[in-house]
Amino acid sequence: MSNVLILGANGQIAREAINLFLDTTEANLTLFLRNASRLNISNPDREHVIEGDVTDIEKLKEAMVGQDVIYANLGGSDFVQQAESIVEAMHAANKKRIIFISSLGIYDEVPGKFGEWHKNTLGEILVIDRKAADVIEASDLDYTILRPAWLTNNDEIDYETTQKEEVFKGTEVSRKSVAALVVKLAESPEMEIHRSLGVNKPNTEGDKPAFVK
Ligand SMILES: NC(=O)c1ccc[n+]([C@@H]2O[C@H](COP(=O)([O-])OP(=O)(O)OC[C@H]3O[C@@H](n4cnc5c(N)ncnc54)[C@H](OP(=O)(O)O)[C@@H]3O)[C@@H](O)[C@H]2O)c1
């Protein structure tokens, strides 16, 4: 039975992951988020809530005590600072394993018209996402970075992965699929360590995600 710390626990992928952890594993969850009153707790025996901002290193260090896996579901304009804060707190708390959600396109690995459209649409966000991933990859942590395709709320688990040196596949993937991969990684401590994985739904190649007009 593992102890999992979820950072950004009210995020949309995180909420899918919480449900899957509760339904399919015996993991104990520590849910770290801003404005904790937003969360609905369905299993108080296995869900422990900590209200905090990830850039608060002292709070983060306290939250890491007793954890086996840290799962970061974050983002935003201070993403680099968030990543630095996580690395510092993990060092101080003597923690190694992190699953870190990033984004497709940070290595310019998305081919063709979709790649161009994605880069133009995201602009500076991609630069920030790359820098945050660089902070995690430059650390000595046992990281797995996930780079999901454009996210849908489809109620399906259907994904494939690509490695960092491979061309990205597809255009979209469901949040539930990314959550399922997070749960699998959290339950398999040796899986995909020091890797950065693209995550997409098979057979969704195109010039744009199908749901974008
Ligand atoms: N949309 C797409 O198609 C797409 C594709 C690939 C990757 N991504 C990226 O994947 C990530 C996860 O996706 P998602 O749908 O779960 O995103 P989301 O719902 O926006 O979740 C991100 C969470 O990060 C939290 N957060 C941000 N800064 C924080 C801080 N300083 N301290 C604590 N929490 C903080 C936010 O908290 P608050 O609720 O308090 O603001 C939010 O709940 C996002 O970064 C997104 O950019 C998105």
Image: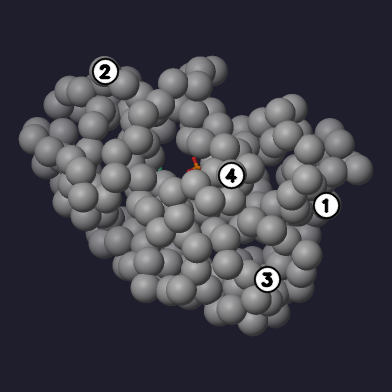
Marks 2/4 in contact by CB < 8 Å: the verdict is no
Report the Cα–Cα distance between label 2 and label 4: 27 Å
In the image, 199 versus 131, the foreground residue is: 199
Q: Residues within 10 Å of mark 1 (few under 14, many from 20)?
A: some
Report the Cα–Cα distance between label 1 and label 4: 22 Å
Look at discs 1 and 4 and give the one toward the viewer.
Answer: 4
* Residue type indicated by callout 2: Asn
* Residue type indicated by callout 3: Leu
Q: Is residue 32 above or below residue 203?
A: below
Q: Residues within 10 Å of mark 4 (few under 14, many from 20)?
A: few
Q: Earlier in the sequence, mark 1 or mark 2?
A: 1
Q: Earlier in the sequence, mark 3 or mark 4?
A: 3
Which quadrant is the C terminus positioned in? top left
* Residue type indicated by callout 4: Ser
Q: Which mark is residue 48?
A: 1
Q: Which residue is mark 3?
A: 60
Mark yes or no: residue 183 visible.
yes
Q: Residue furthest right?
A: 45
- Here the colouring is one colour
Q: Which residue is mark 4?
A: 188
